[in-house]
Amino acid sequence: MSIVQEDRLKYLSSFQPFKVLATETLSEKALEADIYNAIPTEKVDGTCCYVTTYKGQPYLWARLDRRPNKQAEKRFKRFLYSVEDCKEFIWNVEEDFKPVPDTWIPAKEIEFSNGNPLPDENGHMPGWVPVEKNSKQYCWHSSVVNYEAEMALVLKHHADPGLLEIRPVSLSELLEQTLELIGTNINANPYGLGSKKQPIHLLVPHGAFEIKNPPTLKQSDIVSWFEGCCEGKVEGIVWHCRDGCLIKLHRHHLGLCWPLAETYLNSQPVVISFNRNDYDCDFGPKSLFHQFSKLDGQRFDRLKDIKFDD
């Protein structure tokens, strides 16, 4: 089962249609990272975020890849179509890429040359921009953080087995972590959270949902697991390797459908833990923090059952 470079194949799609599929053989990358001793976790379907310092305090940052301009992208596509090794392509970092906000920072895995960040093998520079309070562009991101209280709304496992929990978490506890933003207006809302009238968004720390009964690293076993058990009703698997490497497998890589009518995340009950008296902060009446604080202690059979009073 190889981990394929999906984005690179998308670049080529204007020349020839491609379908991204995993093979029977484990990739060298996976073997070198010792995937056999990695921790398998659920791949949650959302948009990636990052928590790091901005303006002297912990801030949520939204994913923003710096991408090539049209001319450079055409040149890169032609190059990819004619050769196999994209590392031979020569970029002009100062001229080939679209501008980004001054606050943009590159992701940690980006390599540098002469003080300039270098694009990855897909021709992108992964990076982040801070989510400002009341941001219009990143309004769903900003809805899950409160910078006055320095808190974020997080979905994690509860201490009781088989129970999920939504609670405010200090942003300082999340420093230098990546998380997934899920909810009503993210990726067509595969988990059925909220509604157009009452949108609900939450942060899920990466690696939060460890797979307790994972399949073996054999393609047929993985396909059977995805198709045949409740725990397999997920978007994919992310193996967290000891060296920090992440090996990802999406259902689409195996020719399987996503999203599903019922997901594993929605098969588990969830409790709201938000005692407003614990926080010295005046939450706005329309904020998610205010709405969830009114549900403190309440338990729901599924995430999609959470509703706020009008």
Image: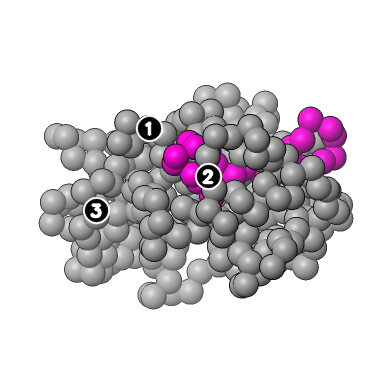
Q: Earlier in the sequence, mark 2 or mark 1?
A: 1
Q: Residue 57 bears which disc, if any? A: 1
* Relative image position of residue 96 (x, y in whole percent): 18, 58
Give the extent of the magenta segment. Answer: 144-165
Asked if residue 15 can be seen in this view, the reply is: yes
Q: CA distance from mark 2 to mark 1?
A: 19 Å
Residue found at x 72% / y 39%: 273
* Relative image position of residue 47 (x, y in whole percent): 51, 54
Asked if residue 28 can be seen in this view, the reply is: no
Q: Quadrant of the C terminus?
A: bottom right
Instruction: Give the residue type that dot 3 points to.
Output: Pro
- Can you tell which quarter of the image residue 27 is in? top right
Q: Nearer the viewer, mark 3 or mark 2?
A: 2
Q: Earlier in the sequence, mark 3 or mark 1?
A: 1
Observer-nearest of 125 and 104: 104
- From what the image shows, is residue 268 above or below residue 177? below
Residue found at x 38% / y 58%: 135
Residue topped by disc 3: 101
Observer-nearest of 286 and 114: 286
Residue found at x 19% / y 68%: 71
Q: Is 223 a magenta residue? A: no
- Can you tell which quarter of the image residue 183 is in? bottom right
Observer-nearest of 124 and 84: 124
Instruction: Give the residue type that dot 1 points to.
Output: Gln
Residue count near mark 1 (Cα–Cα under 10 Å), binned few <14, some 14–19, many ≥20:
few
Q: Nearer the viewer, mark 3 or mark 1?
A: 1
Q: Nearer the viewer, mark 2 or mark 1?
A: 2
Instruction: Give the residue type that dot 2 points to.
Output: Asp
Residue topped by disc 2: 282
Q: Secondary structure at mark 3?
A: loop
Q: CA distance from mark 3 to mark 1?
A: 20 Å
* In-image side of 138 versus 106 (left or right): right
